[in-house]
Amino acid sequence: MLEYDFVSLDTDWGTGYSLFGGVRIDTNGHREVIAQRAAEGWRYVGWLPTTQRATGQIDRIDLIFEREVKRG
């Protein structure tokens, strides 16, 4: 059986407006979180946007991790 854990990260609005609208959006700290969770036995599965503006810009994401439930 698998168990799941979620880590929420905010996105930062970068610079770089384009002629077609929108801005660059960056995440910070995601690599450190993934490496730390891997050291704890978690496997990175993917991510989901959890807060998104009507314009499509993502403000917050969840990183998803899984691992086997230890029985015993």
Image: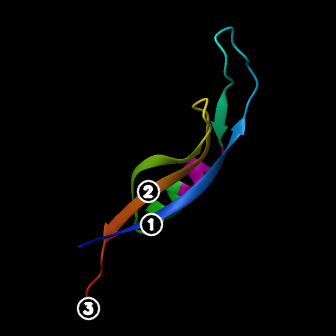
| Quarter that holds the N terminus | bottom left
* Disc 3 target residue: 72
Residue 42 sits above or below residue 20 on the image? below
Gap between marks 3 and 2, in whole Å?
25 Å
Amino acid carrying mark 2 in the image: Ile
Magenta segment, which residues?
Answer: 28-33
Asked if the magenta segment contains residue 32, the reply would be yes
Task: Provide the major secondary structure of the magenta segment.
Answer: helix
**Residue at screen point 36% across, 63% down:** 66
Q: Quadrant of residue 43?
A: bottom left
* Disc 1 target residue: 5
The image position of residue 57, as x and y in percent, is 61, 33
Crowding at label 2, few (<14), some or many (≥20) Cα neighbours within 10 Å?
some
Gap between marks 1 and 3, in whole Å?
20 Å
**Residue at screen point 52% across, 53% down:** 62
Left or right of 35, for residue 21: right
Amino acid carrying mark 3 in the image: Gly
